[in-house]
Image (tube, grey):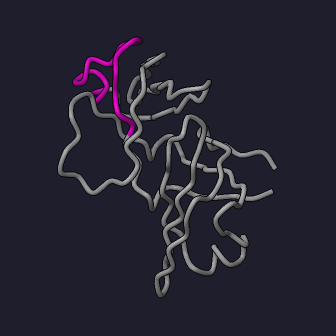
Amino acid sequence: MRLSIRNRFAGTVTAVTFGEVMSTVKVRVAGDREVTAAVTVEAVKDLGLSAGSSVHVLVKSTEVAVATGAVDGISIRNQLPGTVTGVDHGVVMTTVKIALDEGNVLTAAITKDGAEDLSLAPGQTVTALIKSTEVSLATD
C-alpha cells in the first residue's frame, strides 16, 4: 500500500493504557523519542498491540504544528525538538522539514503567514507539536 502521509516512523510499543472506548499507546521511535497515540480500544485489539509490538507511526503533515520558543503549559503530548532543514513557501502554505535525529525527518505543512511570522529558516531549532489524537498506528 502506498500512502500520501509524509510522516512515517518505525517504532516499538512501550505501553498501552486502556480506557472504556479509547486507549493511549506509547511508541519508542529512533533516538529514544516517545510518541503517544490515542486510538480506539477496538483498534488496539484489531492490531494486536501490546508492549514490544512493532508498529509504524503515521502523522499527516497538516497535523504538525511548529513552535520556536519554549513550550510550557500545553496539553499536547507529542513535543519533538528538532532542527529545520528546509522551508518551501507556496502561495498559501509552507512545508517545513524538521530533522529529529538518526535520519528521521518530520514534515509540517503550515500556513505561509505562520511560517513567515516565525521567521523559519534552515538551522533553526524548533519543536514539532502533534496531538495524540492525530497519530495513527499501523502494523505489517
* Residue farthest to the bottom, as pictured: 20
> At 50% from the left edge and 74% from the top edge, which residue is drawn?
17
Task: From the top left corner, tell me how far across and down residue 23 is, in percent.
Answer: 50, 74
Task: State the residue in front, 107 or 128.
Answer: 128
Task: State the residue in front, 71 or 59.
Answer: 71
> At 52% from the left edge and 33% from the top edge, which residue is drawn?
106
From the viewer's perspective, tell me whether residue 43 is left or right of residue 83: right
Task: From the top left corner, tell me how far across and down residue 100 is, in percent.
Answer: 50, 29
Task: State the residue in front, 95 or 65.
Answer: 65
Task: From the top left corner, tell me how far across and down residue 12 is, in percent.
Answer: 65, 53
Residue 32 sits above or below residue 46 on the image: above
Count of marks overlaid on the render: 0
From the viewer's perspective, tell me whether residue 138 is left or right of residue 68: right
Residue interval drawn in magenta: 113-128
* Residue farthest to the left, as pictured: 73
From the viewer's perspective, tell me whether residue 111 is left or right of residue 105: left
Residue 140 sits above or below residue 47 on the image: above
Q: Give the quadrant of residue 13.
A: bottom right
Q: Give the quadrant of residue 49.
A: bottom right
